[in-house]
């Protein structure tokens, strides 16, 4: 991609003043990199060509869109439309609601933001279910399983509203691993996996938990995954919460 200053939004610290548009559509700024002008048609075209090259020539089949709060969701939908991946997921990591007692029970705004983002991609991309992660790790850490049922008797995360587009997970390279910005309690990780692997959504298994945590842990993870496959649990499986 033969880009110059014209590909960067006006007013950005990396801008040379030759861009066409000011930032728009996103609500976050990643200070370590330029704010790319996705409204520029030449930018759209070159990214689409690059993604098609990655898929058709290199062999990648799916996309993970990083830091998607930095640009409008419509562009993710556009790039998926142009590159035709088998699957895509976006990382929309927003702030959850807290009150005097800690994490609020009602996290509807948090998961509504995820729903809005998915819909704005024209449902061409799924999203990581950060709502479920935040609620689940708090429930496991403090033995507060009442958190796992919302006011309407549904799972309280994105899986309660849009399970086919919800990628559930316990940790990733940002939240856990060596960075540990928002880690799941280490001694509760298998409990967390028992939840997401037996519930709707698209469970995402973290490399560290399979490859770096020892043979016994790997065996237990394999047993959980086999149970899901043997039970043929679809991503949009219905849930009837008898007690939480």
Image: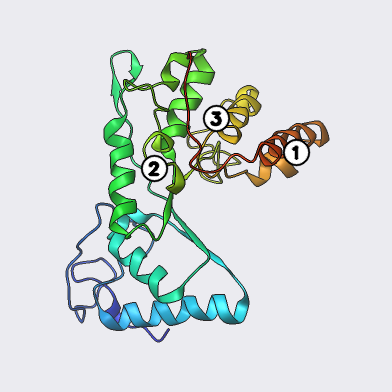
Packing grade of label 1 (10 A; few <14, some 14-19, many >=20) is few
Q: Is residue 30 left or right of residue 181?
A: left
Q: Residue at x 34, y 41 (%)?
A: 94
Kindly report the distance in space between the C-alpha atoms of the residues bearing marks 3 and 2.
23 Å
Which mark lies nearer to you, 2 or 1?
Answer: 2
Q: Are marks 3 and 2 in contact (CB under 8 Å)?
A: no
Residue farthest to the right, as pictured: 215
Residue 160 image-quadrant placement: top left
Q: Residue at x 17, y 73 (%)?
A: 21
4, above or below 171, in the image: below
Kindly report the distance in space between the C-alpha atoms of the residues bearing marks 1 and 3.
19 Å
Q: Mark 2 — residue?
A: 162
Packing grade of label 3 (10 A; few <14, some 14-19, many >=20) is many
Q: Mark 1 — residue?
A: 222
Indicate the quadrant containing the N terminus: top left, top right, bottom left or bottom right: bottom left
Q: Residue 79: where, in percent of width, then height? A: 38, 71
């Amino acid at each position: 991609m033969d880009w110059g200053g014209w590909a960067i939004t006006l007013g950005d610290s990396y801008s040379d003043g030759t861009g066409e548009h000011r930032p728009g559509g996103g609500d976050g700024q990643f200070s370590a990199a330029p704010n790319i002008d996705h409204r520029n048609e030449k930018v759209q075209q070159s990214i689409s060509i690059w993604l098609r090259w990655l898929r058709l020539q290199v062999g990648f089949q799916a996309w993970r869109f990083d830091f998607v709060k930095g640009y409008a969701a419509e562009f993710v939908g556009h790039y998926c439309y142009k590159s035709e991946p088998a699957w895509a997921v976006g990382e929309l990591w927003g702030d959850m609601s807290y009150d005097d007692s800690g994490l609020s029970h009602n996290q509807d705004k948090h998961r509504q933001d995820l729903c809005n983002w998915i819909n704005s991609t024209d449902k061409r991309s799924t999203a990581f279910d950060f709502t479920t992660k935040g609620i689940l790790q708090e429930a496991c850490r403090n033995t507060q399983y009442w958190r796992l049922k919302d006011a309407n008797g549904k799972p309280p995360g994105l899986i309660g509203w849009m399970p086919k587009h919800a990628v559930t997970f316990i940790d990733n390279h940002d939240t856990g691993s060596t960075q540990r910005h928002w880690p799941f309690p280490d001694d509760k990780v298998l409990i967390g996996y028992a939840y997401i692997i037996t519930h709707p959504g698209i469970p995402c298994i973290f490399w560290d938990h399979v490859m770096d945590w020892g043979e016994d842990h790997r065996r237990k993870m394999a047993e959980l995954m086999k149970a899901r496959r043997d039970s043929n649990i679809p991503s949009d499986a219905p849930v009837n919460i008898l007690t939480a």
